[in-house]
Image (tube, grey):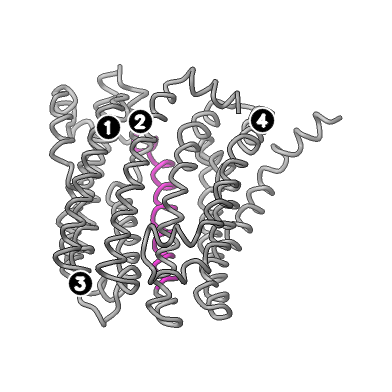
């Protein structure tokens, strides 16, 4: 733990961590208030429908920006003092993102009815929400492009201010729309709020006039695209496959067990998202940069086990506390109508614990650009998640979905240990000798 703290204190990540924690706290508060409003004004059934839209929105947004975000931040930071390479980086990301976003917008707009049936079944008609999503998507993509520029140039305080104002603005509009229009308001707010802070972001970017003028179609570069490709494909696989499989599983719950049970499962997923934000932030800010620096098995093993010794016990203790207080957590975040969610905590928390153990090591795939390893493992995870969930839902009802979550990540962890076993335990064995 001491090494972890010293590393952050002596690194720019110290500042980022503080600013990022403020953003996460704001997101969690906004998320809890939104969940509370949905629980009170819409109910359990509406929670299931909104869950499907949230997952679809996540997949569509990821495709629209081609998974460029992390790669763009990395190469902006790397080329910020090289005018030509920076121009090529910005131009390639902007124009490719522009075309993919327009393509996805047209796809959503002109297939709104089919998408509506996939997300909400033929019993509901929210095709207009999909069309609103199509119209809002370009604003979201442009906003994220601007965010990546500020992130690459280390404009962390500006990002913090914009993020917090955006969360407050988005929360206000969401609560107003839910209060006035119930589920219609919740669905519309879900697709428009990610784009609301574009104006503020553009003001920040236009202050950097040299950056705006450096975006030229003539500077689109195949070499830069090749640099982006590993980041893009790995990001797209996880950012699209996992949300889509969640929709398929949720639809299966609706068809076999009922829409209320699907609403309980979505409520459990929301709670999981809230507490995982903290641990995911630590892994992104510390583990990934460290793995990028490490070039030998001994240091890799050392960092993994340091994380296991320092962070995992705190995370595990937090999960135990959440389990003990699950009755109060459900009431705080939702309402008494969601009390059946308490039965889902055990397997969800256990699965999330295994997930973190696994993902910490799996960050090595990204750090070392182990492209095919990452793709195959992600596909394996998605396939196992689907079949285990379906089998267990048939046997245990909605509880089978969280049991499937646990089984999937347990098997994922097993495969990760097989791949990195020699790096982790081989070095340990050598040290003991």
Circle 2 residue? 19
Rounded to the nearest angstrom, the CA distance separating label 3 from label 4 is: 51 Å
The stretch drawn in magenta includes residue 92: no
Circles 4 and 2: CB atoms closer than 8 Å: no
Residue 295, compared with residue 143, is above or below; it is above
Q: Are marks 3 and 1 in contact (CB under 8 Å)?
A: no
Query: How far apart in space, not on screen, are marks 3 and 1 (Cα)?
Result: 33 Å
The C terminus: image quadrant: top right
> Quick one: 78 or 282, which is closer to the camera?
282
Q: Which mark is residue 302?
A: 4
Tag 2 near tag 3, CB within 8 Å = no
Which-is-in-front pick, marks 1 and 4?
A: 1
Specify the segment rendered in magenta. 223-250
Give me the residue at 13% from left, 31% from top: 203
Q: Residues within 10 Å of mark 3 (few under 14, many from 20)?
A: many
Q: Residue at x 24, y 26 (%)?
A: 87
């Amino acid at each position: 733990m001491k090494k972890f703290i010293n590393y952050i204190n002596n690194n720019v990540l110290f500042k980022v961590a503080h600013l990022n924690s403020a953003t996460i706290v704001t997101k969690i508060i906004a998320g809890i208030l939104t969940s509370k409003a949905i629980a009170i004004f819409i109910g359990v059934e509406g929670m299931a429908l909104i869950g499907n839209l949230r997952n679809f929105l996540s997949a569509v947004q990821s495709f629209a920006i081609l998974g460029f975000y992390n790669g763009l931040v990395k190469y902006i930071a790397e080329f910020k003092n090289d005018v030509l390479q920076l121009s090529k980086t910005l131009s390639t990301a902007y124009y490719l993102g522009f075309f993919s976003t327009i393509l996805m917008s047209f796809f959503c707009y002109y297939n709104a009815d089919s998408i509506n049936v996939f997300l909400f079944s033929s019993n509901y008609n929210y095709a207009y929400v999909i069309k609103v999503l199509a119209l809002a998507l370009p604003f979201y993509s442009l906003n994220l492009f601007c965010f990546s520029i500020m992130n690459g140039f280390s404009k962390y305080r500006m990002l913090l201010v914009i993020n917090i104002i955006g969360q407050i603005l988005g929360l206000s509009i969401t609560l107003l729309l839910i209060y006035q229009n119930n589920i219609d308001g919740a669905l519309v707010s879900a697709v428009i709020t990610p784009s609301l802070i574009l104006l503020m972001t553009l003001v920040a970017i236009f202050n950097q006039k040299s950056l705006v003028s450096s975006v030229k179609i003539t500077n689109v570069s195949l070499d830069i695209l090749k640099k982006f490709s590993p980041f893009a494909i790995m990001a797209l696989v996880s950012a699209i496959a996992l949300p889509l499989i969640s929709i398929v599983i949720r639809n299966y719950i609706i068809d076999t067990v009922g829409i209320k049970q699907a609403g309980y499962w979505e409520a459990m997923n929301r709670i999981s998202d809230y507490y995982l934000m903290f641990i995911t932030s630590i892994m992104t800010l510390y583990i990934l940069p460290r793995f990028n620096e490490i070039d030998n098995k001994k240091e890799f093993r050392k960092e993994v086990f340091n994380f296991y010794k320092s962070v995992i016990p705190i995370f595990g203790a937090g999960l135990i506390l959440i389990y003990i207080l699950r009755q109060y957590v459900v009431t705080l975040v939702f309402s008494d109508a969601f009390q059946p969610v308490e039965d889902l905590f055990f397997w969800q928390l256990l699965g999330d614990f295994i997930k973190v153990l696994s993902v910490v090591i799996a960050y090595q795939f990204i750090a070392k650009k182990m492209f095919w390893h990452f793709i195959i493992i992600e596909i394996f995870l998605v396939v196992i998640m689907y079949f285990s969930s379906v089998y267990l839902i048939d046997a245990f009802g909605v509880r089978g979905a969280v049991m499937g979550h646990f089984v999937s990540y347990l098997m994922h962890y097993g495969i990760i240990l097989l791949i990195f076993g020699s790096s982790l335990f081989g070095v340990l064995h050598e040290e003991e000798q």
